[in-house]
Image (cartoon, helix red, strand yellow):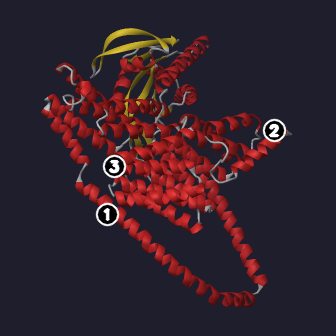
Amino acid sequence: MKKILRLLLVLCVFGVSHSFAQKRGQALIDSVLALLPDAPQDTIKVLMLGKLSYNYYPIDPNKGIKYGKEGLELAVKLNWKPGIGTLNGQIGINYAVQSQYDTALVYFLKALAIKEEIGDKADIATALGNIANIYFFMSNFPVAIEYHLKALRINEETGNSKGIALNLSNIGLIYKDQSEYNQALDYFHRAVEINEAAGNKPFLANNYAGIGIVYYRQHKYNDALNYYTKALALYEELGNRDGMAKCHSYIGVVYHEQADYGRALEYLSESIPIFMELGNNVGYGDDLSNMGNVYLSLYKNSNTTDEWKNYTPGNKISLLHKAKYYIDSAIVIEKRIDNLKSLKESYFRLSEVYALLGNYKRAYETHQHYKLLSDSTFNIDKKNKITQFTMQYDFDKKEAAARAEQDKKDALALKELQRQKLVRNGFVGGFATMMLFAGVFFMQRNRIKKGKKLSDELLLNILPEEVAEELKLKGHADAKQFSDVTVMFTDFKGFTRLSEILSPADLVEEIHHCFKAFDNIITKHNIEKIKTIGDAYMCAGGLPVVNKSHPEDVVLAALDIQAFMKNHLEERNQQGKEIFEIRIGIHTGPVVAGIVGVKKFAYDIWGDTVNLASRMESSGQAGKVNISSSTYQLVKDKFNCSYRGKIKAKNKGDVDMYFVDSAI
């Protein structure tokens, strides 16, 4: 009985907005986890899983995604639309923290569609704000501010002060990034006023950090440190590790500007491992670039900085090499996540490093990259669009007030006319007509619903879930660069000979039997099937949703396929049937993935990684799993492997190859 009462209490608490006054962060997570095993399989458990997903995002976003997807699966099973909408939004937040913006956007758009269907204005505004933030992170400021202003309109209509404060704060961030500092401070301080009055510490911490950034940009470093310190204290109180890491980073950058290089490196070094652990690639990339910038400044000021005065020329040059190492590492990450704003700054810094090293050719090339990203027309166009949206917002606000007054007058004039029409037309006739149309409407809606379900299922058989959702929501799915994917090819040795012996029906049945088993195996290991070409089978790990375990996942799947084929061939041999063996090849590297075709969609991948994976298969041996050196370096601690030496691969020259013998 006590457990049931505790669960009901949790339900009551979850029903109160988005806040949880007594517990936040890890404390709330521990409380919910203690209750979760006893939760019934109903909306209570959906809410609990949603709370876990939301509170894990600044601590461990991978767990946030895990619990979010569990909650979403249950909400879909219950056909509980409020839960479906909320869980999509919370999963999106966790992906956003990991800088997986395309995936986050898909979930936020799904959340918006559900909330609009329900008609919950507060949640619609939240979804609009989340979408705006994704566009902000992708440096698409005009679209970001458009969505924020839509959210602000709704929150003002409903009197949602918390939502208004959040929208004001986010608009302030956009103006801050466009160097419109006075407007940014105006929006931030308006948000602070609301959040201080409400005691909303999580949002207040964000406001303080935003104001600190503006003061930093205005070279008011003491004011910046003051606000950063206030923000850091709140983040520490809340247990928000992402916020703590950001503040350490901000403070480190201020100390750099004040030429306190030791403290700058100390604070930046504290934030980097947290960003890495959380999967926050924006913060991680920024701090790598900032570390490089500190070493660059140390080199340029080594003759005037006391602790570096005694450095030998060789040691001073090492400062430049450290700067290059950190900035190069930052550029790799910034390219991968399309962080154009930070990438521009990193190119500028790297150009200076090359110039100081005397490599003027690379300095010029790198500076050209910087100039391309700094194109003035591009930035002016963005500012013009932002101004256009804010002016339109002010106009719409005035027009809405005038229209509301006129609507009141029109309503009074029409009220009597509507009453008379209702009496004149008669209740019975109107009711019969209404029932007729209702019947037609519900029949049509059911047909549409069944057709939509069938088309969704067919689409998911062709495309990955995330890509299918993007296609449905946006009308297209963008091609995407993946910096690290593991590709596997399989091919049957002796299958051509077998095809000459078997009937067409038996041949197709044999291929189907094997490929069906392969499908089940790769699904178990979270791998995406790409396509089959005759008796060849191609799949890849690490896409469309990025993960770090893909090299191990694909090799494990390959060993499972190897074991399946061994058993299958033994069965065929015992039955006196013709046998054939399998070759498996694996390689890890970058690819481009996207949809090809307009009449028949197909998800495919391209790049030299695909070609080399194919060469791994063709250069392998029957019954063996052959992997490249790139894959070997990523899995050598998990599997026993035998080095084959340098093997000649078609159009690739001599390539290091390894056979995977077993898992360790």
Under mark 1, the amino acid is Asn
Q: Earlier in the sequence, mark 1 or mark 2?
A: 2
Whether the residues at callouts 3 and 2 have beta carbons within 8 Å, the answer is no
The quadrant of the rendering that contains the N terminus is: top right
- Which label was assigned to residue 384? 1
Q: Nearer the viewer, residue 96 or 346?
A: 346
Residue 587: which quarter of the image?
A: top left
Query: Pointer 3: what residue?
Result: 220
The reply to whether residue 606 is visible in this rendering is no
Residue 324: which quarter of the image?
A: top left
Under mark 3, the amino acid is Lys
143 in relation to 501, above or below: below
Q: Nearer the viewer, mark 3 or mark 2?
A: 3
The location of residue 411, given as percent across then percent down, is 62, 85
Under mark 2, the amino acid is Lys
Residue at image position (36%, 67%) is 388
642 in relation to 98, above or below: above
Density class for disc 2 (Cα within 10 Å; few <14, some 14-19, many ≥20) is: few
Query: Pointer 2: what residue?
Result: 3
Q: Nearer the viewer, mark 1 or mark 3?
A: 3
The location of residue 354, given as percent across then percent down, is 18, 32
Kind of element beneath mark 1:
helix
- Which label was assigned to residue 339? none
